[in-house]
Image (cartoon, grey):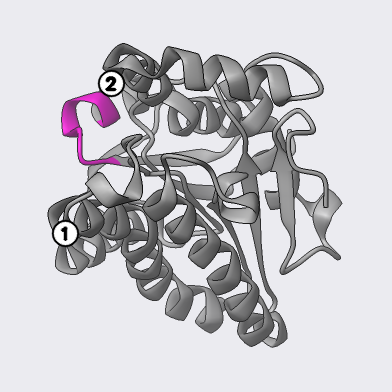
Amino acid sequence: MEFQDRVVLVTGGASGIGKAVALAFAAEGAKVAVADIDASGAAAVASSIAGLGVPMDVTNRAAVGAAVGDVLAAFGHIDVLVNVAGWDRIMPFVETSEEMWDRVIGVNFRGVLATCHAVLPHMIERRSGVIVNTASEAGRSGSSGEAVYSGTKGAVIAFSKAIARESARHGIRVNTVAPGLTDTPLLQGMIDDGNEQLIDAIVRATPIRRLGTVEEVAAAILFMASDRASFITGQTLGVGGGLVMM
């Protein structure tokens, strides 16, 4: 199996893309630490794959450090970090509040900073490791009603390129996977909030003309984390059905 006995830490692993990623790595033999602010959800996913459930609020740097410490105590090392935790609400930028900015930035960007800052020294010491950060096609092209979200995902892409440059000499690869519209509980919540027409319009503008699945995004993340991608770093792989082509 491709990830036999490798240790993988997945944030946002209690549901949606993160859960699919955790299950996919486990199916390939990995020891998976499932991290999420939803501690019971993380524990349930971890139990189903004989992994480790780790409570983690990515917006709290101390909590992130403690959770990474728990993973290292349990497994001894971390081979792969996958950042999936994210949050968004659709609304025109002029209607957003500073509180909303803080939450979107805190989860989507500062959370990535915190986990990478906690894990990278360990990987540098071992001279080995892979980081895959989850961005969004919105971070590459912008998305109406998601100005702040788009900004954070663009920041994740640029940040990932920068630490890929810094870390390559230590044997560490860093890449980004950018999903388009994907059938997740978060997207369903946006539809329930009254955004069905906008979502339908984006699907119609997508050449493949459908939503992505969490399994399709997970497959891309596993590829980027695998030895098959051993000469790939600092790149962004779009998984959006052709919505953004670059």
Say left or right for 38 vs 210: left
| Residue 110 placement: quadrant | bottom left
Q: Give the residue displayed 60% in from the left and 19% down from the top.
A: 201
Magenta range is 36-42
SS assignment at label 1: helix
Q: CA distance from mark 1 to mark 2?
A: 34 Å
Compared to residue 112, the image places residue 25 above or below, namely: above
Front residue of this view, candidates 212 and 245: 245
Compared to residue 133, the image places residue 49 above or below, namely: above
Say what amino acid the circle numbered 2 marks.
Ala
Mark toward the start of the polypeptide (1 vs 2): 2
Say left or right for 47 vs 168: left
Say what amino acid the circle numbered 1 marks.
Glu
Front residue of this view, candidates 201 and 6: 201
> Which residue is denoted by mark 1 in the rendering?
98
Say left or right for 15 vs 216: left
Q: Quadrant of the N terminus?
A: top right
User: How far across and how far down the image is residue 129, in percent?
Assistant: 61, 66
> Which residue is denoted by mark 2 in the rendering?
44
User: How far across and how far down the image is residue 150, in percent?
Assistant: 48, 52
Q: Give the residue displayed 32% in from the left and 68% down from the top.
A: 114
Front residue of this view, candidates 27 and 74: 27
User: How far across and how far down the image is residue 141, in percent?
Assistant: 64, 51
| Residue 84 placement: quadrant | top left
User: How far across and how far down the image is residue 218, in percent?
Assistant: 62, 32
SS assignment at label 2: helix
Q: Give the residue displayed 61% in from the left and 25% down from the top.
A: 202
Neighbor class of circle 2 (other Cα within 10 Å; few <14, some 14-19, many 20+) is: some
Would residue 43 be visible to someone looking at this image? yes
Is 55 within the magenta? Answer: no
